[in-house]
Image (cartoon, rainbow, N blue to C red):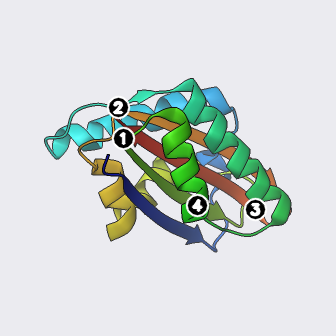
Amino acid sequence: MAAVFGLAAAWLAAPLPAAAKGNDDEVFQQEAVRQINGFRASEKRGPVTLDPALNALASEWAAKLAHEGEMEHRSMGNMRTLLSSHGWSALNENLFMSSAPSASPSEVIAAWKESTGHRRNLLQGNITRIGIGTAAGKAGFFVVFNGAGG
C-alpha cells in the first residue's frame, strides 16, 4: 500500500486583532471545514468531513505544541504508525502558530492557502477526512490540521 505524507507549517509573529478571534474548538472546527471545503470546491476538489479520530489526534498534538511552546511536526515514524494503525493510505499535517492568544479560522486558512506546502495539503485529492485541533499556551495559539484518506 502506497502511503502519502505531507507536512507544512505556518507562523504569524504579529498579534491578531481582537475582533477576529475564535476560541471554541467545535465552532472553530466547523468553520474551518466549511472554509476548506469552499476552497477545495473552487479548485475542483471533493469535500472533506470532520473525523472524530483525526480531531482527537490534531487536538492532542496542538496541546503538546502549546505546552512546549514551539512548532514541531510529528516524526515520519509517528506518521507511519498512525497510517498503519488507522488503515489510512494518506495522512498529512499543517501547523499554524500565532503569538496572539487566539486566531480565527479565516486567518489560519488564509495563511495556509498562501503557502505552497499548506495549500497542497488542503487540496490533496485523496484526503477525504480531516481533523482540526487548537490550543493556547504561553508562546501563543496553535492550530493543527490532519487530513487522511483511504
Secondary-structure class at tag 2 = loop
11 vs 57: above or below: below
The numbered disc on residue 77 is 4
Mark 3 — residue? Answer: 140
Marks 4 and 3, Cα distance to the nearest angstrom? 27 Å
Q: Amino acid at mark 4?
A: Gly
Of callouts 3 and 1, the N-terminal one: 1
Q: Are marks 3 and 1 in contact (CB under 8 Å)?
A: no
Distance of mark 2 from mark 3, alpha carbons? 28 Å
Disc 4 or 2, which lies upstream in sequence?
2
Amino acid at pointer 1: Ile
Q: Quadrant of residue 44?
A: top left
Q: Counting residues from the N terminus, which is met first, the one under dot 1 or under dot 2?
A: 1
Mark in the foreground, 4 or 3: 4
* Residue 14 place in picture, x, y as percent: 63, 72
Residue 50 placement (x, y as % from top left): 47, 27
Q: Which residue is mark 2?
A: 48
Specify whether 99 is left or right of 17. Answer: right
Under tag 3, what secondary structure?
A: strand
Residue assigned mark 1: 36
Q: Nearer the viewer, mark 2 or mark 3?
A: 2
Q: Are marks 4 and 2 in contact (CB under 8 Å)?
A: no
Q: Residue at x 45, y 34 (%)?
A: 87
Circles 1, 2 touching at the beta carbon (< 8 Å): yes
Q: Earlier in the sequence, mark 2 or mark 3?
A: 2
Binning the other alpha carbons within 10 Å of mark 3 as few (below 14), some (14 to 19) or many (20 upward) gives: many
- Residue 38 can be seen in this image: yes
